[in-house]
Image: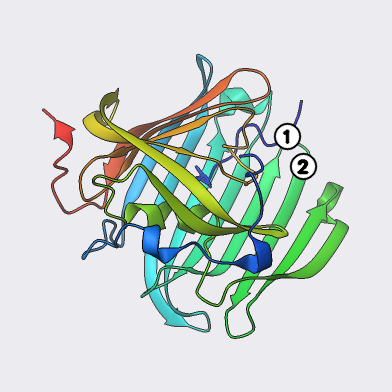
Amino acid sequence: MKRNFLVIPLTVMLLIALLPRPLLKAQAADSSTQPYLVSELPFEIGERLVFKLRYGFIAAGQAEMKVLALKNNGFGHYYHIQSTARSSRSFDWFYKVRDVVNSYMDAKRLYSIHFEKLLREGGYKADTFVDYVYQDSVARVKFLRYKDGMKIKKKEAYEVKIPPTGVFDALSAFYYIRTLDLNGVDTVFVPTHEKLKVYNLPVIISGPEIVKVKAGKFRCWRLVPALLEEGIFKHEGKINIWLTDDGLKIPVKMTTKVIVGHITAELIKISGVSKAIPAKVE
């Protein structure tokens, strides 16, 4: 079976196939066409969103998206965002997944300053680490693939030119979109880095729609991005992401077509959100 059919960013995320074209000279998105940032962040420390993963009609596992901390250390002043994917015990015999993705976002501008992708999918085990060094306009990437016993099978290290104005990894791009005012907007572009490419991630926005999941019934915007990321949304067709159409923009549901069938992530639990959710329909 082909790997990477059950992994998040939900990386999220998550965070998925090739975009139309890379940006020339790592040029950033045209800020004149971008919606404004909202005045108050929609997420808070301790936010935890839990999703049920389904492969067709089969319960396949669980994914989480968490805002873990606001820290100030060697990476600077940053938010630590994490997404995880774990196949269920009954699904492990078919395809075992234990994945973790960490994104460290600059606390003020929200662009990526460090990224970690730790994939454990069936017999495939690989880690990716990225440091974003804006003073040098480069992303320093280290990739490790392992064989049995976690011995290194392949090791790569390289640099990618990035704009000094900032880029986003697949997970931080998702949280950045949540900070935008999407009212009256039909498309946004997010400067995104993945592997050797820097590109404008186009996200088409429509709605509102009513979406019902275990966590409740919500009015939502539908977002259709074209992501370039290994994980649950490495797709063969269109990705759909539904966010609440209020200031919080909480992800409610995500769907994508994979090699054989469809993967669906549905929100089953919300915790660590202190505000009311205006888009929730009673």
Mark 2 lies on a secondary structure that is: strand
Q: Is residue 231 left or right of residue 186?
A: right
Q: Is residue 199 left or right of residue 212?
A: right
Three-letter residue code for mark 1: Arg
The number of numbered badges drawn on the structure is 2
Crowding near pointer 2: few (<14 within 10 Å), some, many (20+)?
Answer: some
Residue 131 spot, x, y in % from top left: 63, 73
Position above or below: 216 against 85: above
**Residue shown at 31%/46% (left/top)?**
185
Position above or below: 184 against 80: above
Q: CA distance from mark 1 to mark 2?
A: 7 Å
Kindly check if marks 1 and 2 are in contact, taking CB atoms under 8 A apart as contact. yes
Mark 1 lies on a secondary structure that is: loop
**Residue shown at 64%/84% (left/top)?**
136
Label of residue 3 in the image: 1
**Residue shown at 49%/42% (left/top)?**
10
Residue 255 spot, x, y in % from top left: 48, 28
Crowding near pointer 1: few (<14 within 10 Å), some, many (20+)?
Answer: some
Q: Is residue 24 left or right of residue 52?
A: right
Residue 101 spot, x, y in % from top left: 56, 54
User: In this orientation, which residue lies closer to the viewer: 189 or 235?
Assistant: 189
Look at the image and tell me in which quarter the N terminus lies. top right
User: In this orientation, which residue lies closer to the viewer: 157 or 137?
Assistant: 137
Q: Return the residue found at the far right.
A: 153
Q: Which residue is mark 2?
A: 124
